[in-house]
Image: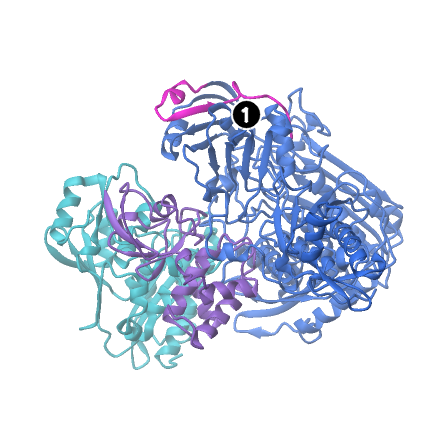
Chain colours: A purple, B cyan, C blue
Amino acid sequence: MTITLTINGTRRTLEIDPGEKLLDLLRREGTMGPKVGCGTGDCGACAVLLNGRAVNSCLVYAAKADGGEVVTVEGLERDGALHPVQEAFLETGGVQCGYCTPGMVISTVDLLSRNPDPTEAEIRQALSGNLCRCTGYTKQIQAVQRAAERMRGGGRHD
Amino acid sequence: MKPTTIDEAWTLLVERGKSARAVGGGIDVHLFRVKDVDTLVDLTGLGLSYVRSEGGLTIGATTTFTEILESAAVASHLDGILVEMIEQVASPLQRNQGTIGGTIASAHPWSDVIPLLLVLDAELGVYDGAARRLSLAEYLADRAAGVRPLVREVCLPAVPGTAAAAYEAFTATGFDVAMLNCAGFVRADGGRCETVRISVGGTPALATRLPSVEAELAGALLDESAIERAAESASAAIDARDDRRATADYRRTLARVGVSRCLGRIAKRLGGTG
Amino acid sequence: MTSRPEFTVVGRSERKVDGRALVTGKPVYVADLQLPGTLHVKILGSPHAHARIVRIDASAAEAMPGVACVLTHENTPPTRHTTAGQGFPEPSPYDARMFEDRVRFVGDRVAAVAAESEAVALEALKAIRVEYEELEPVLSIDDAVRDGAPVIHDEADSTGIYDAARNIVADVDIDVGDVAAGFEGSAMVVETTCETPYAQHTPIETHVVLSYLDDAGRLVLRTSTQVPFHVRRIVAQTLGIPIHDIRVIKPRIGGGFGTKQEVLLEDVAGLVTLRTKRPALLHLTRKEEFVAARTRHPMRIRVKLGSGDDGILRAIEMEALSNTGAYGAHGLTVLANAGSKTLPLYNKAPNAHFYGQAVYTTLPVPGAYRGYGATQGYFPLETAMDELAERLGIDPVELRRRNHIRVGEGSPIFEKLGEGREGVEQTIKSCELERCLQVGAERIGWAEKRGKRTRDGACVHGVGMSIMMQGSGIPLIDMGAATIKMNEDGSFNLLIGATDLGTGSDTILAQIAAEVLGVPLRSMIVTSSDTDFTPFDVGAYASSTTYVSGTAVQRAAEKVRDQILAVAAPVLGGDASALRLADGAVVGPDGASMTLADVCVRAMYETDQFQIGATASCVPTESPPPFLANFAEVAVDTETGFVKVLHYVAAVDCGVAINPVMAEGQMEGALVNGIGYALTEEMQISSRGRVRNPSLFDYKIPGMLDIPKLDVILVESYEPTGPMGAKSVGEIGINGPIPTIANAIYDAVGVRLKETPFTPERVLAAMRGAAG
């Protein structure tokens, strides 16, 4: 079947297998940001924004994205400048192997777009579906707090 | 396939029988894949995403958990007990995708949603060629017997007078399914329990109400000793089994503690009758 | 402590050199490279824990459209080898074949299919007809060693097994002094036996390899590995092809933690490519990662301590039984480390005995895992110390103070027990454990909280502590090398074999080089882990990268520095010995300077031209341990047994921290993994040897909601033998949580747990048991 969707701002019309998952579609079309971690929605490494909401793209049928808008970690830069969330993760040491990072960043962007001043408890809740084995999460929480602060201070809010 | 009317959806499902499945977010049909399903009937085009608060709370079947969490009407129903429970369900990523209708239709034994909806006396608006209503308990019984109408909406009655609810789930980590969960609802009149509903789930079976325990508390003062007795009864009343997550014996302990904590919180919320 | 010099780049929390690519989702991991014509490879795993393959018929699969090749024991090399990524000759038995007519655990390799798509490959797997003769499984250590137990490795061509007929892979027996006499003469004797189960590393990226032929027809393995050079050698050995026909590249990888210190997939993908001439992608599913990758060695360890009334240890005995699964990879070395990384900590004991065996079972295969035996060993050791402290009426912190090794001291264990064979004598040259104990105790509120059992609803609070050491590389065995070459704008290429798993080694090694060369970090262009271009390095394990590879980098940088100064000397006038490097220039004593760019232009184009560059290696002669003091506060729910860690303090001496934020990050990640291992992680094995919970849904690792307040305190020392004074920090953190939390639970509710994980059910049962 054929679907049309916007991927990181570019409208695409694509042939898909009806049973195909959004993650597999994105990756075979060259969008490598979202990662394959478990295939069962347990690790969050595949998280993307679908119509503004962070979802496990390994659980979303590509067909359901028809007519929708997908944003992946690759779509967050603006004219070569990193999104404040990306910047913050780099600064605080919230990135080690980086495999969970695309999903973490997407979940963070979703959180901050709705809650610009989250408490630590709210941050932990919002990122509870993103597993990391390298960092122990502490510096990632700091990254979210730092990004939130910057974005409240007049940085980007998208 | 994405039908635009519920009748269309139902007809498709009937025609294709075992080879078709209805989907909301589509999570469970992927994770708990049944063989030979080649048609997914997407219900999200039927206008069933809504939260209405005329006379209680009515939630459309394809409303996602996040949408429910963000609803002011849900937050004010029974002091936000639904919010309290939903925040423990899966992860935010899954809550953005999963729908309340989908979760009821899947009826996973560890479901957090069903035990609470049972004690809140939920009714479902369903469709199977014609629209009808039935209680959640009836729907689950029918479902177990192989009868599966489409879920259109979940209806929670308005709560008159003094009432409170509580929910408790025991999990190994924060993002995990329950090794046991329980929910309680009490409507009180002058400190005495006029209506009591208690459910325990994940035993590992799906949640059910505990009528014997409810009967014990009917008309009683919800004080410490009543709560303790009810908790003991609940522990004995459940059919606990061993599985990967917990042993039967431990589940009985959790049932006692869980019901005790639920009733304790309810007592506090009712204004300290205990 | 030797006073630490002032550094410019070292000691700063520089951003990772690969960070931007990671945070913008660049296609830098193995599976992100898509090559046209790539075949998808799937492996057929055994349904039985132990069986002979009587007959295998792949003809239907081979005939399926879209199937390019099928591998079985009938058409692959029979070479016995070890999959363990260790230096040659590997201290692990050569007991594995690519494919065999025998399977020894549920999930063991039976066959492999390469097809046009994953779907076709999976269909083809189903079409392979296998006739098994089931053999009696061996599902526990006890079953393995009893009389009449089935012999799991009875083949004639396996080597390096201690006693195959009794399923014993390794046997280690080390004596210092006379423990029997030591215990006789002790005023107090404490004994405990602890058990740790199967656990898995769960790197978020599972094992994956992409193999292809380059334009010269050489086999290229782009693989998620910790040990590129060992992969090259072992694949060459297994497939019977020359080493020079193989190139191994490690791009960015999604975590390793030891499970990728193994040659697990590369032989299969490589052979598919060699036979079909096409690229081949083999990517384990999460379930396969649990079942057929590598795991922690489950161990049962007994520790006996004897001390005087003053708490000073007279004798330590450790007896370890290790389950090394169906194949013996890392069996001997992990076993030995349970003793070699623990016993020297308490060198005051003049008598010590370590005895251990690693035993085959027909169960999933353990391998290297952060901590590497020390994690298992510290559980009984540090809980026994806690018990000893209580029985003697001495504060646990004080008891450690009286017994732990100090600067200037050694331990006979160092030379008697190394990585399986003998070790290497050494004397401690840096140790801030004293200060670690002091700051850690203060931060947790030890004096205020210990023994108080503060109640909070149904919960009781308790605090516990433990200390440990690890090592920094394997002395006389590990080798790492680095090459630096200069560019005419004053930048440098740094070529290192060392393997960055996400640990940040590319960055810290570049920091070391930049420090010597007097340039900012951004002047270093790092290329790592490509066997064609980077010099040899054993790879990322044994906490070796900073200490061993870092020293090689420092030496190479110093050679390059000397060349630069020699080029600049005639220009600036005077002797090279009077010049130094700073801020991207050569500076003379009178202030005259020459930029590095000018130096290189001169050397590359103008006078006596030569390429400024050097290669240097390092073989360490000792393994200076990092030291760690852990303190944790827990809340135990007395109604349900749930244990919540409220606050975890880890005061660590890793020498000089080359990059403090990264050192903290290593500690935090290791601690959280350790907390998972202490509280929730356990691979459950069925009565038929099958893993019952091979998914992240059922095997619970800590998430954001589960972590306590983590306080990592870097207590720096200066290690004179280490690059810039550094030691290591990669592993030690994971050893802390089990004994620390166990001791905290005891403080709270008075029960000593001897089996991990400390699930609520176990804790509650222990409390009830104690109540009588």
The three-letter code of the residue at mark 1 reads: Phe
Can residue C497 be seen at all in this image of the molecule?
yes
The answer to whether residue B272 is left or right of residue C464 is left
Residue appearing at x 28%, y 74% in the figure: B72
Q: Which residues are magenta?
A: C57-82
The chain identifier of the residue carrying mark 1 reads C
Residue B136 or B71: which is nearer the viewer?
B71
Residue C614 or C732: which is nearer the viewer?
C614
Above or below, C16 relative to C37: below
Residue appearing at x 39%, y 22% in the figure: C61
Residue reaching furthest front? C606
Residue C92 in the image: x percent, y percent?
A: 69, 34
The answer to whether residue C271 is left or right of residue C548 is left
Residue appearing at x 72%, y 71% in the figure: C439
Q: Is residue C432 magenta?
A: no
Residue C353 in the image: x percent, y percent?
A: 82, 45
Question: Residue C66, located in which quarter of the rendered image?
Answer: top left
Can residue C47 be seen at all in this image of the molecule?
no
Image quarter (top left, top right, bottom left or bottom right) of the N terminus of chain C: bottom right
Q: Residues within 10 Å of mark 1 (few under 14, many from 20)?
A: many
Residue C229 in the image: x percent, y percent?
A: 65, 37
Residue C364 or C543: which is nearer the viewer?
C543
Find disc 1 in the rendering and name its residue: C99
Residue C659 or C491: which is nearer the viewer?
C491
Above or below, C638 relative to C235: below
Residue reaching furthest left? B130
Label 1's element? loop
The answer to whether residue B36 is left or right of residue C102 is left
